[in-house]
Image (tube, coloured by chain):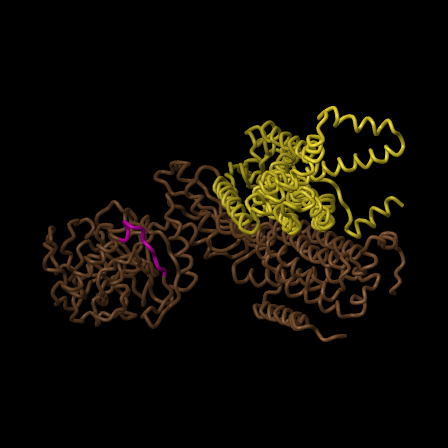
Chain colours: A brown, B yellow
Amino acid sequence: MASPSSNVPKPGRTLLGFFAVLGILTVIMLLQGQVTPKLGLDLAGGTTVTLTAKTEGGKTPPSSQMDQAVKIINQRVNGLGVSDAEVSKQGTNNIIVSVGGAGQQQVVDTIGKTAKLQFRQVYASGPSTPNGQPLPSATPSASTSGSPSPSATPSGSSKPGAKPSDSSTPRGRAVSGALAAPTPTPSGSGKPSATPSGTPSTTPTTPVDPNAAGQDFSGIDDPAVIKQYQALVCSPNGGPTVPGSNNPALKWVAACDQKAENGQVTKYILGPVRVEGTQVSGANSLPPDPQNNRQSWSVSLKFKGQGTKQFGDVTSDAYKAYQQNPSAPQAQVAIILDGQVVSAPQIREGAITGGTASIDGPADSFTQSYADNLANVLKYGALPLEFQQSSIDEVSSTLGADQLHGGLIAGAIGLGLVVFYCMLYYQGLGLVAVGSLVVAGATTYLSVVILGEGMGFRLTLPHIIGLIVSIGITADSFIVYFERLRDELRAGRTLRPSVENAWKRARRTILVADAVTFIAALVLYFLAVGGVRGFAFAMGLTTLIDVVVVFFFTKPLVALLSRTEFFGRGHRFSGLNRARLRRNGPTPPAARTKSQEA
Amino acid sequence: MAKNSVLSRFYRGELSADIVGRPKIWYSISGLLIIFSLVGLLVQGLNFGVEFKGGSVFTIPAPKGSSITDVRTAVTGGGVHGDPTVQKAGSNWRVTTESLTSTEVAKVKQNVSKDLGVPADKITTQVVGASWGGEISKKAWQALLVFMILIIAYLSVAFEWRMALAAVVALVHDLVITAGVYAWSGFEVTPATLLGFLTILGYSLYDAVVVFDMIKEVTRPLNSSSKITYSEAANQALSSTLVRSLNTSLVAILPVAAILFIGTTLFGAGTLKDLSLSLFVGMIVGTYSSICVATPLLVQLKEREPKYRQLRENIARRESSGKRQAKAAKVAKATAVSDDAVDDVDDVPEDDAPASVTVRKVVQTGPRQQPKKGTRQQRRGK
């Protein structure tokens, strides 16, 4: 055989490269430890949560609000990945959310969140004593202690296992914790010696004796809230939601921190709402960035125009307070989610006017999945109603295993027919087609398994059928090429140059046609929601695989085979026999019964 | 033998048919199908599944040893049509059915209670909203619209706007007819059906694009002095890609048909049927439309272009002159046979332009000269 001419690429190398990539994919799949694709809700069952709207006096919530809630929950649940979750209204006040896969506790926890976001300036904060057992004193709420990270929550530097003796710190604002008694006595609080750290400029409208709790309540003109605050006992793990704390209309609210930090939960008195969650236009989770002093995962928020200004104002006020007195509680801006404080960063570096904010917290609670879920929930806005989980069930699949097997068997038969037809019509060349189909099938399988792990892609029965059908459609590309090749041969050219000439012509057709399908997949993926999105994902995937297989498998294989004697000489069963392709060819393939090559 | 020769021609890729030449046949067939479909959609409407319009949900405490089939039988035995979704949720069975009236609900409860031995008052019923509600459908429509615009833009760049228009018309044609089949047959439209429709979207265009690519290639060398019109060239292209079209359609339809017929007979209705049926209908219509609707439409649009109109006129003139020549040749033959014929022919021009040789010459040679003039002018112009 002659050496390949210069413009002919080296098909052997391409093929080797292709199989190397397939091998790498297989290794990745094996390393992931998951060798079968994840199945969707219809095939494998999943988790169903019933969310019941909380209304005053058990009234029926307005159906428009329920529909709105369904819409938002749908966006949230589908924002988590390409899983086909189902969200539907049941009865008048329930929303049923079904997610594929068992044990989706975290998903379930986040999607039902109201996710009402508020930004308020902190006016007072202090540690809460868990469970109403008054410790004599708590540690100072040391947001004021000089060296927190920019976003440190007020309790950030408090010591675990606070002991009464700690209260002798000179920093003041040592709080006697929440006592059961309405008027807390400074029993164990050591020396509340320090002067109140409030800004002198604000004149307390309600004179509160700072010595009562060693705390400055200057500027707070609602004695009820102060009482509420003083009586407030946060639960040891964070929370609970203090009544009224989720109401943006209230000027003053008391609230608990969402998480315990170093064994302590901080409680706050917060000023009026400065920015509302409706002003958030986008949210993303960001990985830790130790170089910029961000130890945990965080959620970055982007504000709309008005929100940008409002956030600029509140941070500017906080920064002023910080400049006057670095330990002033007003230097902190609290981020309140569903009535609990997620974080209350101190504004130490000037007003934030860029229209972005970030929420972070201690690294042990701000994990990647927490940040992802929080960003996802914030992105789609707050629910118009509050919901509580009334039940969580593991649900069985809606389709029996028989449907899956049936689909697979029928699909296999169908693909078998395709193979049979290709062999009959293209004979030797049919082998290439069959090989390509097998390779396309294998690539699809590998991709689905790997992506199932990485993107939360779960196969439903429609996906599986869609994939089988797509593999059938993949054959289209081979046929376009084969027909071009045969056109060249019919025109009387020899095989070797025809392989390249036909490829040049077929390549454009294949690319243009696949581009159309790919555009369809992209548009549906980015614009549609729910099940359509998962399907579009599968469609785009198979289109890409089609192009990859034709370029890096089918064509090199044909080029390689054209060098063999069987194909190169145009054996009568090679499917490339010039004499048979032309007008005066002998009997058609259907009439032939016995094989002469055997 | 005749059969063999068709197969043999198929193998050699020589199937051809004058599809472009008779657009009216195809347009009337498609027009009728579309009207039929639209009437079906308006009169019958689509039969949307529970996922789209909501329904009733029964929560039944699961008795020991009850299987999905038991529950399904019990529910359908109570007069529920279609294919209720049966799920086990915790220790309950959750059955979603179509929307039922209160009497129907009572009947189902009674039947389930009897069949499964569960007290009727333990079975709860609630109205369930659409899980594929307005939002998903609205977004899907939006996506479809954006897709159409993008595709027209893309094909206008890759090919030209006429091809984009023809391809999209064929696509709408396919979707309307497939929907019409669903309307008339009363098959339930489920999410799986919708996904089938979306697949057709890609497939129908894919087919049209491959045909157009061939037409573009074949018609590229055409100019005003070519020997064939755009229509003829397009028909040639279509014929040469016909085998490919039929092959690929067959290859794509084979798995779908297998799933539809084998899957449905073995496992009854359900997702398998919903998806494969819409694919099956859509693919057949899609193949038909890419050959018989998109291409003739494209050809009609192209023939309006001045360039190709000119070409057609030129060829027509050449042809008519050619006919004259042929006629003359015939006449010449005839002259040899009979003198009368010669007289007849000779007499005619003489009657038209009596007694003037020059005038007669103009009349005789005029038609022959005109096309020549035309081509010369064109050549000069270029």
Locate the N terminus of chain B by quadrant.
top right
Residue drawn at x 55%, y 54% as measured from the top left: A537
For the question of whether residue A397 can be seen, the reply is: yes
In which quadrant of the rendered view does residue B192 lie?
top right
Q: Position of residue B362 (x, y in %)?
A: 68, 33
For the question of whether residue A465 can be seen, the reply is: no
Residue drawn at x 12%, y 67% as measured from the top left: A193
Q: Is A335 rendered above or below residue B49?
A: below
Q: Which of B225 and A39 is in front in this view?
A: B225
Magenta highlight on residue A307: yes
Magenta residue span: A299-308
On the picture, is B59 further left or further right than A560?
A: left
On the picture, is A418 further left or further right than A33?
A: right
Residue drawn at x 51%, y 36% as measured from the top left: B127
Q: Is B110 rendered above or below residue A72?
A: above
Magenta highlight on residue A301: yes
Q: Which of A553 and A563 is in front in this view?
A: A563
Q: Nearer the viewer, residue A257 or A503?
A: A503
Q: Where is residue A368 in the image (x, y as percent from the top left)?
A: 42, 64
On the picture, is A338 further left or further right than A399?
A: left
Q: Position of residue B185 (x, y in %)?
A: 66, 33
How many numbered marks are there? 0
Q: Is A459 rendered above or below residue B362?
A: below
On the picture, is B124 further left or further right than A403?
A: left
Q: Where is residue B12 in the image (x, y as percent from the top left)?
A: 79, 52
